[in-house]
Amino acid sequence: MSQPFKADFIIDSFALEGTYKGFSVKNDGNINSTFVISLENGAKTDKYTLQKINTNVFRRPDELMRNLVGVTAHIKQKGGMQTLDFMPCRDGKYYCVDGGEYWRCYRYIDNVYTCNIIDSPDVFRSAGRAFGKFQSILSDYPIDSLFDTIPDFHNTAKRFETFKKSVAENRAGRAAGVRREIDFILSREDDMSRLTGLLENGILPLRVTHNDTKLNNILFDEKTNEGVCIIDLDTVMPGLSLYDFGDSIRFGANTAAEDEKDTSKISLNLDLYRAYTEGYLSAAGSSLTDAEIEYLPFSAKLMTLELAMRFLTDYLDGDVYFKLNYPEHNLVRTRAQQTLVSDIEKKLDKMKTITANAVK
Ligand code: GN1
Ligand code: MG
């Protein structure tokens, strides 16, 4: 692969010390591009994570980085959890610009691992504790100081309107081939505004939330398997705690990958659901209201439905948002998420019982 960034420029902008040794590519994200760079400093090697911010998605990188610097400073000050250490540039900003590309850099964290799929309830319980702790550490963060990096990010009701528009416009000419998938979404209209409605009525509180709580956004300690750091803070914004809980379950309690082609492998693992719920409530429990707890099982369904809708919208629009690994990737993702929605619908009563037991 040719060098995707100008190493000299990056090293000089962030005033990194040492001799540049090379980079590796990280393929985890669907939005930004991530690399790990190494610099030799005498006998030791220093590593940094370098990211190109997708400005098609994050249109105001300056505001985005201000959010991140504020939130990470808050976590450092309160303690109890590791966080990202962003490198300032010589000009004091936390990003540099090269030919219209925005770059940021943070210290690479060693002796940790990430996972995309999990079968250990104990590790997933620890994931729940990590996000629960994150929620509670940020519970006193000044919410008004946060920029909305992507307005209405989890506003499912608005996303439903956008979806219907994409179906009607049919920009890529693909609607006729995915009628079944479209109908799956349309038939669940009533679900779309349930949580936003409860927020508007003041029944659910607005909080500082992560908004992208996938399992692979947690760094686990290699020795203890404890979730020690939450990464990918780009979408930290005012939101509902339920978005965070639901998205964690959508991704982590699935027995298969988010984009599994063989839908027979996809289901919601109730043992994992139980473990995450116990871990999450043990760390965030006292800060949550009864209404938030009541909607935990439903949030897993809604977030899965939301992602099914977002992937299908992007497919209908001609694949303009998410990165793809192959041409039909968004359709495969849609089908995988819809399969999971159907399974969650069957298991909702069991999930309610498990949640009630975890509260006790
Ligand atoms: C995107 O880039 P990544 O993988 O962290 C997306 C999330 C989706 C996720 C699905 C800003 O996250 O909302 O849940 O893909 N992030 C944005 O895998 O849209
Ligand atoms: Mg993300």
Image: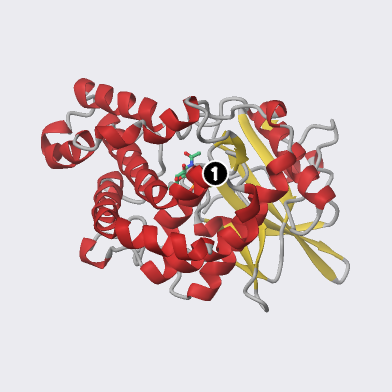
**Mark 1 highlights which residue?**
241
Describe residue 299's horizontal placement relative to residue 107 as left or right: left
Which residue is at 49% across, 43% downward? 291
Q: Nearer the viewer, residue 212 or 95?
A: 212
Q: Extreme front residue here? A: 360
Q: Is residue 180 placed above or below 25 in the rendered structure?
A: above
Mark 1: few, some, or many residues within 10 Å (few <14, many ≥20)? many
Q: Is residue 162 placed above or below 31 in the rendered structure?
A: above
Q: Nearer the viewer, residue 255 or 322?
A: 255
Q: Extreme right residue here? A: 42
Describe residue 111's horizontal placement relative to residue 16 as left or right: left
Q: Is residue 230 visible?
A: no
Q: Secondary structure at mark 1?
A: helix
Which residue is at 81% across, 50% downward? 78
Which residue is at 57% across, 38% downward? 235
In which quarter of the view is residue 258 placed? bottom left
Q: Is residue 339 placed above or below 350 in the rendered structure?
A: above
* Image location of residue 131, percent across then percent down: 60, 55
Q: Is residue 197 visible?
A: yes
Q: Extreme bottom residue here? A: 223
In which quarter of the view is residue 224 placed? bottom right
Q: Looking at numbered disc 1 in the image, what kind of residue is underneath it?
A: Ser
